[in-house]
Image (cartoon, grey):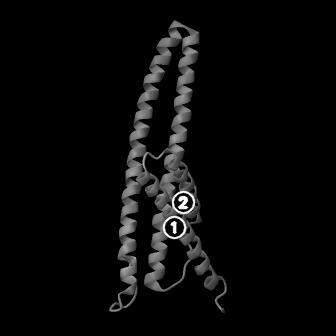
Amino acid sequence: MIFVSAINRNSDGMKTSGLTMIKVINIIRLVCICVCLGIVEIIFIIAMVQSSKGYSALNDISSTAGSIASAGIGVLLVLDLLIVAGFVIAILYYAKIIKSINTVKETITSGIMSNKVSSYVAILTFILAGFTLISVFFAGSALSVLSTLCSVVSMVCFGILIFKYRNTMRSPIDNPNE
């Protein structure tokens, strides 16, 4: 859609409707991740409250059982922190994608160059491509392997595109006389 907008010769510039659609999709993903984080945290709070009740009951019976119960609560806390960290990384990823899309749209509509797209998005996309490539070994069919490889290639291309955009915009901004 972005390509079709760019080659439309009857318009006064490049349209950004494709970028708007991509932005809306990423906003929806961001909202879904935030809702999932809320649900997961509610489940963990309920689990910890129930565990603490069990800890009190077991501690009254035996100190060994109470120690095991407190270790279980500790494991729940560590697991919760890891899950929250994963959600925070995902939330930052989608927020930075949305910010980068806004920067590109502003550059297109105003004509003023800006290289303020996120390297975090590009680097995390490369990392995700690596994890996705590892999942090829667990694919069940040839079609699944092909789909996974196409996904990896698109992630790598997206990361390269972000770095290329930054470098292309950086040159004129840093050296305006060239």
Is residue 21 toward the left or the right of residue 72 in the image? left
Q: Can residue 65 be seen?
A: yes
Where is residue 66? Give x, y as percent: 55, 14
The percent coordinates of residue 145 (x first, y second) are 46, 53
Q: Distance between the Cα atoms at labels 1 and 2?
A: 8 Å
In the image, which disc is placed on residue 125? 2
Q: The N terminus appears in which quarter of the rendering?
A: bottom left
- Residue lying at the far top of the rendered structure: 61
Give whichever of 130, 141 is nearer the camera: 141
Q: Is residue 68 above or below residue 175?
A: above
Label pair 1/2, CB-CB below 8 angstroms? yes
Q: Residue at x 46, y 78 (%)?
A: 106
Q: Give the crowd class for mark 1: few <14, some 14-19, many >=20 residues within 10 Å.
A: some
For image coordinates 54% across by 39% down, the residue present is 81
Q: Tell me which label, 1 or 2, sits earlier in the chain.
A: 2
Amino acid on which the number 1 mark rests in the picture: Phe
Outermost left residue:
10
The local crowd at label 2, few if under 14, some if 14 to 19, many if 20 or more residues have their Cα within 10 Å, is: many
Look at mark 1 in the image and give the residue it sits on. Answer: 158
Between residues 166 and 145, which one lies in front from this camera angle? Answer: 145
Can the viewer see residue 15? no
In this view, 42 is above or below 70: below
Taking the spot 37% from the left edge, 51% from the top edge, the residue there is 32
Q: Callout 2: helix, strand or loop?
A: helix
